[in-house]
Image (cartoon, grey):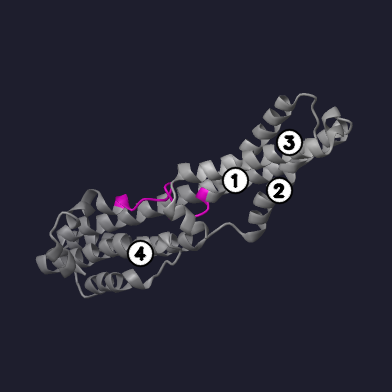
Amino acid sequence: MSLWLLNHFSTFTLAVFTVGGTVLLAVAGSVLLRRRYPSVARGEHNEMVGVTLGMFGAIYGIILAFVIVTLWTQLEDTQTIVASEATDAALITRDAAAFPPQVRARLDATMSGYVHTVVEDQWPRMRAGNPSYGATETHLRAAFQALQDYDPKSQSEQVFYQEAVTHLNDVASQRRARITMARQELPPLLQALAFGGALVLVPLTFLYGMRKLRVQILFVASVAGLVGFSLLLVFVLDRPFAGELSVSPTPYREGALAQYWSRGAHDVSAHR
């Protein structure tokens, strides 16, 4: 459900529903409670409610901060993994320039097929939460086979051959890390703490009575807005490959890899 919402609605739309909805429900709940129990406006229990609200708010704030920082770090790590994989793939194409034409052409074809499959096949799968190794396995195996079949002759070829093997191993490693990141999501316990805590903190603000209704509405709306915005961050950062804030496949289209996207459809299909 979360993936569907992230992939079909803009971040602004989600913000309107999440933050705006939280504020509206909180204000409505506060006004209804005030009308149902007029004694709340006199603030008879403000001292006890204030202590409870402050203690619970501090604990909940720490939990939310931990969750948001963790998810933001995960997003940055995923971006680094994607950039590293694309960089290693580009370096393989550059290293291949030192090999004989037939070996270079073979590696060029396999790396072209690999980056096209990553962007056109694996990326939609990762956005949908169904990443797969199989989509790129054929091209990766072909690249390994091309290097295994080649016996470098000169010292220069041996140096670039070792570099190409190292970069290809790194591509395989980064691919695994990328797919692992695509499968990760916030553990159920932390989800319960983040979203369940809001169901406790926001209603607590209803009990903190103030004589003026406008002041109480402003107080409740401010807390609800902050909580709603924090939950929005948790929601949009939880899946690094879904939504508007997702990791982009642009690195696979830039630099030395750009040559694979400037060719015609016939050449692209031939590389697959």
Left or right, 139 with respect to 221, comes to left
Left or right, 99 with respect to 130, comes to left
Residue behind mark 2: 199
Q: Distance between the residues labelled 4 and 2?
A: 38 Å
Residue at point 73%, 36% (across, down):
31
Q: Nearer the viewer, residue 169 or 46?
A: 46
Q: Can residue 59 be seen in this view?
A: no
Residue at point 65%, 50% (across, down):
194
Residue at point 84%, 37% (across, down):
37
Span shown in magenta? 236-251
Q: Distance between the residues labelled 4 and 3?
A: 50 Å
Q: Residues within 10 Å of mark 3 (few under 14, many from 20)?
A: some
- Which amino acid lies under the numbered mark 2 shown in the image of this protein? Leu
Q: SS class of the residue under badge 4? A: helix
Residue behind mark 4: 122
Left or right, 55 with respect to 2, comes to right
Residue at point 68%, 37% (across, down):
27
Residue behind mark 3: 31
Q: Nearer the viewer, residue 205 or 57?
A: 205
Q: In x, y percent, where is residue 26?
A: 68, 40
